[in-house]
Image (spheres, rainbow, N blue to C red):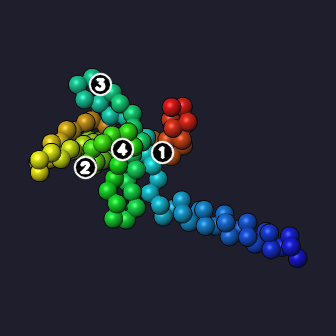
Amino acid sequence: MLSVLVRVCLVLIIAAGVIAALVVPQPKLVTYKKANLVSTSIYWAGLEGDEPVLLDTDADIVRLDENTGYLHLCHQESGKNYCQKFKVVTIQGADAVLSHWLSH
């Protein structure tokens, strides 16, 4: 009886993990450049209502436009936005994020 209960619990935990992986935005490893300076950062789009972030920047506004291939980073100062546009070199998935995170 206990083994059946353990199996059911394990199946429910795995199912919850799969559903979470499908619903929650996955982080991306973004390599971008400007004026021959190249940087790689972890980008996360955030949950519903949250603003996207690059984990290693203090930018107030982060926008990744995969259609145009640009990353926009903005800082707010004295009520004004100062933005910079970077060319995206590569966008990799969660496995690359984990590898990058563990190597630093």
Q: What residue occupies the far bottom of the structure in this picture?
A: 1
Q: Note whether 51 is above or below 56 in the view shown.
A: below
Q: Is residue 30 visible?
A: no
Q: What residue occupies the far top of the structure in this picture?
A: 36
Side of 86 where 16 appears, left or right: right
Mark 4 vs mark 1: give the one in front: 4
Query: For residue 45, which quarter of the picture?
Result: bottom left
Which residue in the structure is indicated by mark 4?
54
Which residue in the structure is indicated by mark 1?
93
Mark 4 vs mark 3: give the one in front: 4
Disc 2 to disc 4, C-alpha distance: 10 Å
Of the two numbered discs 2 and 4 on the same chain, state the one appearing first in sequence.
4
Of the two numbered discs 4 and 1 on the same chain, state the one appearing first in sequence.
4
Of the two numbered discs 2 and 1 on the same chain, state the one appearing first in sequence.
2
Of the two numbered discs 3 and 2 on the same chain, state the one appearing first in sequence.
3
Q: Note whether 47 is above or below 84 in the view shown.
A: below
Which residue in the structure is indicated by mark 3?
37
Q: Position of residue 62 (x, y in %)?
A: 28, 48
Crowding near pointer 4: few (<14 within 10 Å), some, many (20+)? many
Disc 2 to disc 1, C-alpha distance: 22 Å
Query: For residue 42, which quarter of the picture?
Result: top left
Q: Amino acid at mark 3?
A: Leu
Crowding near pointer 2: few (<14 within 10 Å), some, many (20+)? some
- At a point 27% along the width and 44% down the height, the residue shown is 59
Disc 3 to disc 2, C-alpha distance: 21 Å
Q: Amino acid at mark 1?
A: Gly
Which residue in the structure is indicated by mark 2?
61
Q: Amino acid at mark 4?
A: Leu
